[in-house]
Image (cartoon, helix red, strand yellow):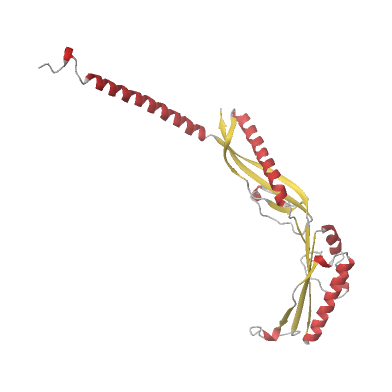
Amino acid sequence: MDSTGVGGRNPWLVPAAVLGGCMLLGLVLGGWLLGSQIKDIKLADRYVTVKGLVERTVKSDMAIWPVSFKETGNDLSQVFAKSETDKAAVLKFFAAQGVTPQEISVGQIQVTDKLANEYGGNVTGPRYIVQQTVTVQSGDVDKIAKSGEKTAELVQAGIVVGGNNGQGGIRYKFNGLNALKPDMITEATRNARSSADRFAADSGSQVGSIRSASQGVFSISAADNVSTAADEGGGGDSGDSSIMKKVRVVATVDYYLVR
């Protein structure tokens, strides 16, 4: 019997041809897909990292002034009475500066008995120390700043005012950061895009879509504080002693570069 089938043709010839054609087509498509993926990978590797800086000068909206004073002696009742006299003088001083009672809070009295400290060893000087703190918290920062310039009046009244600076420890805060954030982030991103456009123009490329972006950290410092590249992430001097503040943010953005 003729194994080539009717007309002398091999019955396996057509299926083999179809299979070979499919394999060839698969190899062509696979090569095309692989080439396309390699091209995409190369394009994905082409990106530029830029930074957008924005700074705003703002005025503090809150002043906090803790005035601490203490008296010492060996008779607790007398020391306490002196401390109460000091407190009355401090409250009178604030009232004369236009500070309202609602802006004043009086802290708890702290009494120290040196003889009650079993680890104190040899005790010298007065036995009792009575300390109090009167704190002013006001949104009228100009009023508190002017009051701080008159701290000498308390010293003249025999009250030793605690604090770390010439205004008796006044701290100024800015609480309006949330209202500034959206506009500052938008402007920082816009500045980053401008930097990317300049870089792309110099390199003969065009700026594509955003690869990644980092908002950065907002920082608040004294308005006259000199910023450096080292503190772009935030931090630094908080500037509590300065009424005028500098709000700063740096946005870091990666842009794809395309031909």
Q: Residue furthest top?
A: 7
Q: Residue furthest right?
A: 96
Quadrant for the C terminus in the image: top right
Q: Residue at x 60, y 41 (%)?
A: 253
Q: 229 above or below 89?
A: above
Image quadrant where residue 221 sits: bottom right
Q: Is residue 122 visible?
A: no
Q: Residue at x 31, y 21 (%)?
A: 21
Q: Nearer the viewer, residue 206 or 187?
A: 187
Q: Position of residue 193 (x, y in %)?
A: 64, 36
Q: Position of residue 202 (x, y in %)?
A: 62, 30
Q: 131 above or below 50?
A: below
Image-based side of 10 in relation to 69, left or right: left
Image-based side of 110 in relation to 10, left or right: right
Quadrant for the N terminus in the image: top left
Q: Position of residue 89 (x, y in %)?
A: 86, 74
Q: Nearer the viewer, residue 108 or 124?
A: 108
Image-based side of 222 in relation to 199, left or right: right
Q: Residue at x 84, y 60 (%)?
A: 145
Q: Position of residue 230 (x, y in %)?
A: 64, 50
Q: Is residue 148 visible?
A: yes
Q: Residue furthest front?
A: 6
Q: 143 above or below 82?
A: above
Image quadrant where residue 129 sits: bottom right
Image-based side of 104 in relation to 233, left or right: right
Exactly how many numbered labels are in the figure? 0
Q: Residue at x 71, y 43 (%)?
A: 183
